[in-house]
Image (cartoon, rainbow, N blue to C red):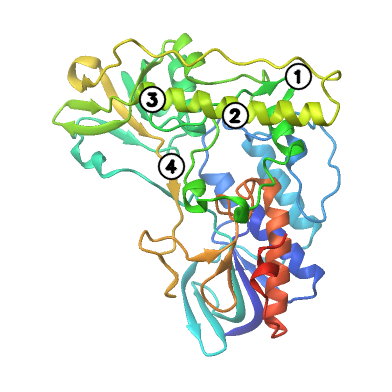
Amino acid sequence: MRNITTVIIGAGHAGLAMSRCLAERSIDHVVLERGEVGNTWRTERWDSLRLLTPNWQRRLPGLGEEGGDPDGYATMAETVAFIDRYAERIAAPVETGTNVVSVRRTETGYLVVTDRVDWHCKTLVIATGACNLPSVPRLVNALPGTIDTVTPLGYRNPDQLRDGGVLVVGAAASGVQLANEIQRSGRQVTLSTGEHIRAPRMYRGRDIQWWMDAAGVLDQHYSQVDDIERARRVPSLQLVGSPERETIDLNALQETGVKVVGRLVGINDTKLQFSGSLRNHCALSDLKLGRLLDTIDAWATMNGLDGEVGEPHRLPPTKVDENPALALDLASSGIQTVLWATGYRPDYSWLHVPVFDRKGGLRHDGGVVDAPGLYVLGLQFLRRRKSALIDGAGDDANALSNHLSAFLDGVAVPPEQRLAS
């Protein structure tokens, strides 16, 4: 048994950012990682994936300018190398190859049991991320046994798929990227689309992420949102990071031959059933895109940029068939594989502390979990709209490390201060 002030579970970008912030406050800690540093980036991403954010957004505490192409989009190999360099630069005390088996409360903190050494700590930070397990609907159990199924965590490239058509379920960032790649491999893709957020890669001559960063959209605080639980469930933007800076939306996919249908709502033997809400979902997505671009245009005008950037413009409305298909027969359509791009969920099977809500999520207030000295990092809209991005980890880690430090000092943090930063 080893005693230490703080244990951080997870040595991805969020856990390492927290390590840097704790080191700045002279708080002794260890970072436990089941695999290698940046393990998820190494082992659970498809071959062609690039970051959705430009390289200039890889901002972490204590990290200076790295050089290279600031407007490029890093490959997974480049991302892993970046996280490795960061861990080395900040001298993070990482224990790799250490799988956490269980965490339980004690009278003075937490007992962290691993497959190597057990730890006792006063404070604990969960930085295992939000994408540990695929979130696949129960409909998967109704698929015929002759149909292959795969999720983005297991998908690597089109060559691993059987010959024949592919149904991609889900049209957030992962779904549209994989639909585009698989369609271009020569397989016929059908994309089942529910709620989605459309976005152009470039707008008025600059990356959409540049605009969202500059206009303060990504810095929106969770206390400023009327329904934060709803905001945390919003799908990721339909973006792809490519050297060509492509915009991949439903219109672009349909131009490559992808067939777009509504949300998958039922499976009866070989018959797929789709919602009739496709037109409404697309209209709502177009409306949200218009609001975002209106915000950007207003900010550009207010800050005197109209003469320096391109003219405002709007993408054509999303094309929807007059009578979208409400049913599809697997046997006659040639679909051999269903790829469930329906999101992810965290894995807290090792956490034996009563801090879960009725849906299995952690009860927390901006990352301050509902248990003394327990914190979480790296979740969607944890404290800011950018919390799940590499660029958001630093601000969140700084705020939570301040709270953690005050907790160790026995200082009660008032609600208004907890909400700050």
Residue flagged by tag 1: what amino acid is it? Answer: Gly
Q: Which residue shows up at 69% across the image and 38% down it? A: 78
Of 85 and 229, the residue lying toward us:
229
Q: Are discs 1 and 4 less than 8 Å apart at CB?
A: no
User: Which numbered disc, 1 or 4, marks the residue closer to the eye?
Assistant: 1
Q: CA distance from mark 1 to mark 2?
A: 19 Å
- Dot 3 corresponds to which residue? 280
Q: Which residue shows up at 51% across the image and 46% down it? A: 231
Return the x and y of residue 163 as percentages of the image width and height: 32, 19
- Dot 1 corresponds to which residue? 205
Dot 1 lies on which element?
loop
Corner quadrant of residue 327: top left
Residue flagged by tag 2: what amino acid is it? Answer: Arg
Return the x and y of residue 318 as percentages of the image width and height: 47, 16
Corner quadrant of residue 288: top right
- Mark 2 and mark 3 lie on one chain; the one further toward the N terminus is 3
Q: CA distance from mark 2 to mark 3?
A: 17 Å
| Residue 91 against residue 171 in the figure, above or below | below
Q: Which mark is residue 343?
A: 4
Dot 2 lies on which element?
helix
Dot 3 lies on which element?
helix
Q: CA distance from mark 3 to mark 1?
A: 30 Å
Q: Are discs 4 and 3 less than 8 Å apart at CB?
A: no
Query: The N terminus lies in which quarter of the figure?
Result: bottom right
Left/right of residue 177 with respect to residue 407 in the rendered view: left
Q: CA distance from mark 2 to mark 4?
A: 25 Å
- Dot 2 corresponds to which residue? 291
